[in-house]
Amino acid sequence: MEESRFDTKTVLENIEAYSKTSFELFKLKTVDKLADILSGIASYSVLLVFILMFFLVGNIAFALWLGELSGKLLYGFLMLTGLYAGILLLFILFRRKWIKEPIANTLIQKLLKD
């Protein structure tokens, strides 16, 4: 009758190699996801700067135009300020639904993708 013997040393070496490989894979996946998230943030930040500059110049021009139509330049800026105050109020009321939840969902999707 043959006895099958396990070489304990070989089994332990295999377990050690497997755990090291698994940990390295985990690190690489984490770095990949982090790089994906950070590169997305960086690209959207650059895009946001250009969009903000476009809207800043456009809003100044629009306020000046409204001021000319109303007779005083100050009124144009006040009308535009009132418009943005209303938009700000909407964002304050719906910030969770419009901002927080979509950003959280996007981050979760990026972190959980394989």
Image (cartoon, helix red, strand yellow):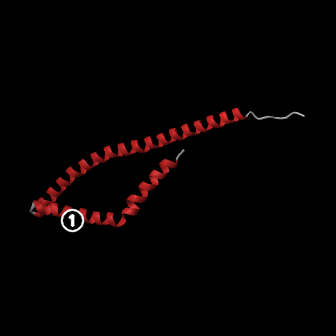
In this rendering, the count of numbered labels is: 1
| Quadrant (top left/top right/bottom left/bottom right) for the C terminus | top right
Check disc 1 and give the amino acid type.
Gly
**Residue 7, how many percent across, how many down?**
74, 33
Front-most of residues 105 and 59 = 105
Q: Secondary structure at mark 1?
A: helix
Residue 3 placement: quadrant: top right
Report the residue that reaches farthest toward the front. Answer: 9
Question: Residue 26: image x %, image y %?
Answer: 54, 41
Relative to the observer, which residue lies in front, 25 or 69? 25
Residue located at (32% from left, 65% from top): 92
Q: Is residue 35 left or right of residue 29?
A: left
The quadrant in which the N terminus is found is: top right
* 100 left or right, relative to 56: right
| Up-down relation of residue 37 to residue 1 (above or below) | below
- Dividing the picture into quarters, in which one does residue 46 lie? top left
In front: 79, or 22?
22
Residue 70: % across, % down: 12, 64
Please give the name of the residue rendered at 38% of the width and 60% of the height, measured from the top-left corner: 98
Up the image or down, 30 lies above or below 96; here it is: above
Query: Quick one: label 1, few (<14), some, or many (20+) residues within 10 Å?
Result: few
Residue 31: percent from left, percent from top:
47, 40
Q: Quadrant of residue 73?
A: bottom left
Q: Farthest residue toward the left?
A: 72
Q: Residue at x 19, y 56 (%)?
A: 62
- Which residue sits furthest right? 1
* Residue, disc 1: 82
